[in-house]
Image (tube, grey):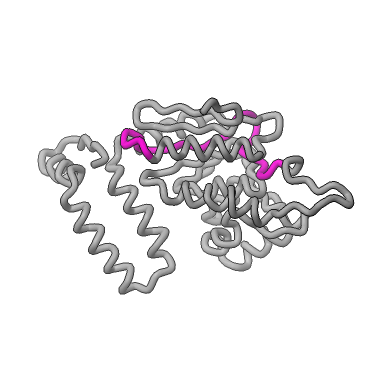
Amino acid sequence: MNYENILFQNEGGIARITLNRPDRLNSFTVAMHTELRDAIGRIKGDPSVRVLLLTGAGRGFCAGQDLSDRAVAPGGKPVDLGETVSTWWAPLVMSLRTLPMPVVSAVNGVAAGAGANVALAGDLVVATKSASFIQPFCKLGLIPDTGGTWILPRLLGTARAMGLAMLGDKLSAEQAESWGLIWKSIPDEQFKGEVEKLLAHLATAPTKGLARTKELIYTNGSAPLDEALAREATVMRELGFSDDYREGVSAFIEKRNATFTGR
């Protein structure tokens, strides 16, 4: 597939997807969804990929849905937004959450609506100090979709989730970090370098172990303790037979840096 709405690069164990409609603040159309789905499918099927970077071109990360793509003309036929969510947004969130590798969301500017919640679907979310997160659905008579009603209360608690969802106020990256919504906010001038350091680290980390860590944190966060402990035992059994565990132990004993292969 030739991509016109995203940029895609895969090199050195790092896959990079850049939402690339900067004139529209990288807002989504069906065409962008289609291209992104194809790129993520390529990543999922490539064992050489150790980490995915998701970011935006230009001055923003993503403004969510391109409303002109889902507009309702006065007196016109209603648009089935449920179909849009079921067909495109929900599968996108699930595909990011279930990728067997870390997903880094690098938020380089405003992330609004579904764009904010796509960013929050990443496993490690970093943002420039000048970035912001907005849940503007209430201003359109809608609800925070793309996982918003699921992730906001889990990360922020009910009071803050309600405030963001019902008022649609802008949340600065620094406040998002302080509240625990994202991993880290970074000075704009240092952002690119810090993101590259993070990607380089994850590209040489024990990928299989990180994939299982991601899986269990998302699964066990709301599970009873006995179920969580049982899953941990099962996964530890699996990872104990991995090449990376063997290498990690050898490197520790030999007092050297480990060379992980992700297997």
- Residue drawn at x 46%, y 39% is 40
Q: As displayed, is residue 198 above or below residue 139?
A: above
- Tally the marks: 0
Name the residue nearer the viewer: 92 or 195: 92
Q: As displayed, is residue 138 above or below residue 227?
A: above
Residue 25 picture location, percent across and down: 68, 35
Q: In the rendered view, does 157 fall on the left or right side of 71? A: left
Q: In the rendered view, does 72 fall on the left or right side of 47? A: right
Q: Is residue 63 magenta?
A: yes
Query: Image quarter for residue 151?
Result: bottom right
- Residue drawn at x 81%, y 48% is 72
Query: Image quarter for residue 230?
Result: bottom left
Can residue 75 be seen here? yes
Q: In the rendered view, does 240 fall on the left or right side of 149? A: left
Q: In the rendered view, does 135 fall on the left or right side of 45? A: right
Outermost residue toward the front in this view: 77
Can residue 130 be seen here? no
Q: As displayed, is residue 38 above or below residue 120?
A: above
Name the residue nearer the viewer: 71 or 209: 71
Q: Is residue 119 magenta?
A: no
Name the residue nearer the viewer: 179 or 246: 246
- Residue drawn at x 41%, y 46% is 99
Classify the position of the C terminus by image quarter: top left
Query: Image quarter for residue 81?
Result: bottom right
Residue 27 picture location, percent across and down: 66, 39
- Residue drawn at x 59%, y 45% is 173
User: For the magenta stretch, what is the residue range?
Assistant: 45-66
Residue 135 picture location, percent across and down: 67, 53
Residue 128 picture location, percent across and down: 57, 38
